[in-house]
Amino acid sequence: MAPKRLLVGMTGASGSLLTIELLRSLSVLDEWETHFIMSRGGQMTMECELPERMGELLSLADYVYDNENIGAAIASGSFMTAGMVIIPCSMKTVAGVHSGYSDNLILRAADVTLKEGRPLVLVPRETPLSPIHLRNLYELSMMGVAVIPPMMTFYSGSQTVEEMAHHLVGKILDRLGIPAEYRRWDGC
Ligand SMILES: Cc1cc2nc3c(=O)[nH]c(=O)nc-3n(C[C@H](O)[C@H](O)[C@H](O)COP(=O)(O)O)c2cc1C
């Protein structure tokens, strides 16, 4: 059985709150371990969007890695995990995963996740999407990658952006088979 370890990458797309919400949800599940990598772009967007919460973000992860450290344990398939989530995922990182161009630890860990046949979830954020973005995401989805963009949810009764983030994270955890408590659709 795969150990309850999840790799979490944060890249330079808007949506730092989503990373905080995912790590927060996992931090209350004692048996789950998070291994967190933030790109330089992820750091920049965090500093723009939620500068006062950087310390909190880092404290929510069990292990934090330098994105330049391509020799870290998580860069190898022999480091067993239950999968990886890249949240938010920039179009540059989407392109890197799509092409297998693994020049940083996030991309290498995603490449390893794919080659080992483990679940990979991308939370891509850009709007509008160009034909290049759509092609890359489509082809990744055909390879078995779960593409879960942060779409607004109108049916869930969410009143705040935090509630929307919580709902999205519930969908991500469902995809990975990790227990999630959020308001599920049960009809009109
Ligand atoms: C404040 C800010 C917001 C950004 N938002 C997005 C975005 O929503 N989607 C995206 O694909 N790129 C966005 N970018 C551009 C990426 O950060 C940039 O392409 C970067 O090279 C991505 O590298 P990374 O994937 O290694 O983090 C944003 C950049 C900044 C500074």
Image (spheres, rainbow, N blue to C red):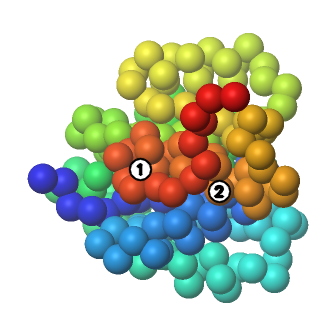
Neighbour tally class for label 2: few under 14, some 14-19, many 20 plus, Cα within 10 Å = many
Q: Residue at x 47, y 32 (%)?
A: 146
| N-term-proximal mark, 2 vs 1 | 1
Is 127 above or below relative to 4? above
Q: Residue at x 56, y 84 (%)?
A: 59
Q: Quadrant of residue 179?
A: bottom left
Q: Residue at x 46, y 67 (%)?
A: 26
- Residue located beneath label 1 in the image: 84
Q: Which mark is residue 166?
A: 2
Is 151 above or below relative to 35? above
Marks 2 and 1 sit apart, C-alpha to C-alpha, by 18 Å
> Amino acid under label 2?
His
In percent of width and height, residue 105 lies at 46, 57
In percent of width and height, residue 38 lies at 59, 64
| Between marks 2 and 1 in the image, the one whose residue lies nearer the viewer | 2
Q: Residue at x 50, y 28 (%)?
A: 98
In percent of width and height, residue 174 lies at 44, 44
> Amino acid under label 1?
Met
Secondary structure of residue under mark 2: helix
